[in-house]
Amino acid sequence: MSTPHGTTTASYAERIAFVVEVAEHLHAYGTTTQRLEGAIEAVSRKLGLECEPWANPTGMILSFSDPTRPAGESDTTRVIRTGLGDTHLFKLCEADRIAEDVMAGRTGIAGGLAELRALEAGTGLRGRVMQVLGFGLASGAVAGLLRLPWLDIATAALIGLLIGLIELASSQRPRLQEASEAIAGIVAGFVAIAVASLIGPLNLNTVTIAALIVLLPGMSLTNAVNELTSRHLVAGTARFAGALTTILKLTVGTVIAFSIATWAGLEPQVRAWRPQPDWVEWGAMVAAAFAFAMLFRAARRDYLLVMLAAMGGYLVSRHGGQAFGAPAGVFLAAFVVTAAGNVYARLAKRPGALIRVPGIIMLVPGSLALRGVLTLMQQQDLGAGQEAAMAALNTLMAVIAGLIFGNLVVSARRNL
């Protein structure tokens, strides 16, 4: 098997080390299993290796061999234990660029390894501040998209900032990280109840869900079912179980907050009121798109692209839903975003995730799933959350159908 110029002198161990480094980075940046395994196989072939990858949401097993040597003589297996990946569009694009440069021979393997390892540097103060602000802006913007009153929007934004601080504190503390979703649920529920009891009435559950929007595993649910439909059964099942666990932890925290408030004698004023005019929704859409560009840690040059993708997905879903019904609108949005991402990847030779991920984020069913479980826990009635559960399932199926047919109509240039 031929290898590109610049890699022919690299040793077998060096080539394996580069593939492993690429795999670890792509896994860390939120790549789904089928795309991750496809990318690993593509890089391995270019470097004159045979690789049989097996990936799951928390680790990988990579089995390598050298096709130029007798069978069994060069077999090498690497078992890699990783944490759950998190979307990081800038580093995903950089890892993709580095891999392409090495495969094309523009960069040597040693240089590529050095560049990949440079990506492991931690986030600076500015990045951490932007992440916290992104939490608050996203929560307030989602409340604006739902046309909630100004007090509701302000409350959601405040809770979002507090949750951002909790996430920042837990990022370096594994034991705190395990309970961070439950703690976030407690904070969201208690602050919302305190405001509704002491300041003014709120759309209580809706404000709580809007505040928790960034922690909701809607994308994980979507990726899980996507992996299952791609016949990656172990990875899909594990990711689905993880997403459900996150929803349960958020619900448990929120219910604990409601119980504490009842014990403390707080009586929240609850109302169902959405008085905002159209311009608030449009402004909130722009703010939400900007917040997700911050939270997905896109490069500055990609902010406009990411924002346009997020707004485009929302607008197609909204107008398509008005014309054909909500599930059809979600399907159309997922279809258009997926196809557009693949076209962009072909033309720009960059990851289609820059369009696909932000374009889908406002469609995913995490908030509906949390509403269903929360209603079930509050009313202790299986029928109470049935409507929200069915809405979440319909949304999830529509997103998956859009992804499948979008990839069918316009095939991806690459696995990212």
Image (cartoon, rainbow, N blue to C red):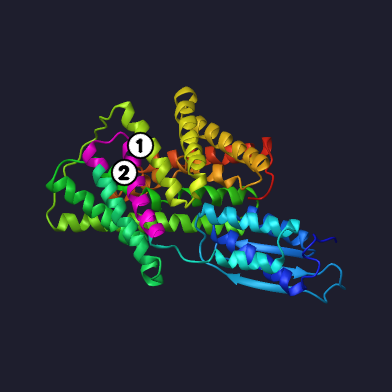
Residue at far bottom of view: 73
- Residue 258 x/y as whole percent: 23, 54
User: What residue appears at the point 51 percent right and 66 percent down from the top-left corner?
Assistant: 83
User: Would residue 179 be seen by someone viewing this image from the given angle?
Assistant: no
Instruction: Answer with left or right where residue 170 lies relative to residue 112.
Output: left
As for residue 104 lying within the magenta part, the answer is: no
Instruction: Identify which residue, 276 or 130, lies in the foreground.
Output: 130
Residue 279 falls in image quadrant: top left
Image height of 320 relative to 290, above or below? above
Instruction: Identify which residue, 235 or 356, lies in the foreground.
Output: 356
User: What residue appears at the point 65 percent right and 58 percent down from the top-left corner?
Assistant: 98
Image mark count: 2
User: Would residue 295 be seen by someone viewing this image from the given angle?
Assistant: yes
- Residue 181 x/y as whole percent: 36, 59
- Residue 340 x/y as whole percent: 60, 36
- At label 2, the amino acid type is Gly
Image height of 248 relative to 140, above or below? below
Image height of 256 relative to 364, above or below? below
- Highlighted magenta segment, given as a residue range: 126-153
As for residue 144 lying within the magenta part, the answer is: yes
Q: Quadrant of the N terminus?
A: bottom right
Numbered disc 2: secondary structure: helix
- At label 1, the amino acid type is Ala
Sequence order check, earlier mark of 2 and 1: 2
Instruction: Identify which residue, 260 or 101, lies in the foreground.
Output: 101
Residue 140 — which label? 2
Numbered disc 1: secondary structure: helix
- Contact, CB < 8 Å: mark 2 with mark 1? yes
Chief SS of the magenta region: helix
Residue 284 — which label? 1
User: What residue appears at the point 31 percent right and 61 percent down from the top-left corner?
Assistant: 183
- Residue 294 x/y as whole percent: 43, 49
